[in-house]
Amino acid sequence: AEATLTAIDDALGFLTDDTKKFFSTGVIGQALSNIAGTDATSLRAKLDTITSGVGFGRLNDMREASKTGGALGNVSEIELRQLNASMGSLDPNQKPSELKKTLETIKENYESTVRVLKAEKYAYDNGLTFKTPKEAINFVNNFNASSPQQTPNTIDPTDLENAIQAKRKLLEQ
């Protein structure tokens, strides 16, 4: 997740600098994308890293949610592209504002996941259990609010409740 977050920040850097944005996206970026060492080539490399991180992360989530862990079998390149596209388009030829919005959404989702995992690990390491999903949500939000390394964003209660329910189903099987 850290490599993906770093790549997202780097890609966002291309989209906030007007000169880099001009030479790395759209028609100009597409024309320069085959020339080594250009901003266009660097942006595309960052987007490839993000695409891989998103795709493999989502595949792992789906495998973990299956009883055997292998329910997906072999995934074709086309299926992986479709899975990645479900998070939003990372095509550098689109409007820079659309690419930036997609990157910010992916970053927010990744940061939320990291916060949940850290809170979950802390709870597990300290032998904490929760009687209700609401109790778990409150713990995660309080944990994140008190952690100096975290951003002030809170976890979406519905997302966390869904994750808790999915884990319960796995444990019951």
Image (cartoon, rainbow, N blue to C red):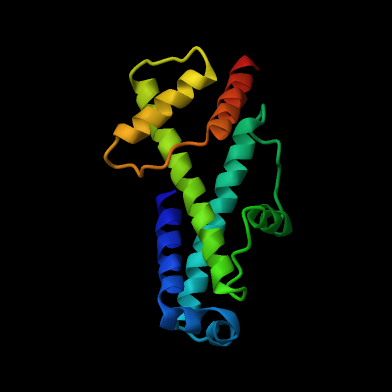
User: In the picture shown, does residue 90 fall above or below 53?
Assistant: below
Looking at the image, residue 46 sits to the left or right of residue 66; the answer is left
Q: Is residue 37 visible?
A: no
Identified at 63% across, 31% down, the residue is 65
Identified at 44% across, 48% down, the residue is 1
Identified at 48% across, 84% down, the residue is 23
Q: Give residue 136's position: percent from left, percent from top.
A: 47, 22
Q: Give residue 97's position: percent from left, percent from top.
A: 55, 69
Q: Total marks drawn?
A: 0
Identified at 39% across, 21% down, the residue is 124
Q: Give residue 91's position: percent from left, percent from top.
A: 61, 69
Q: Give residue 30's position: percent from left, percent from top.
A: 59, 82
> Seen from this angle, which residue lies furthest left?
148
The C terminus appears in which quarter of the rendering? top right
Q: 74 and 43: which one is in front?
A: 43
User: In the picture shown, does residue 2 fall above or below 48?
Assistant: above
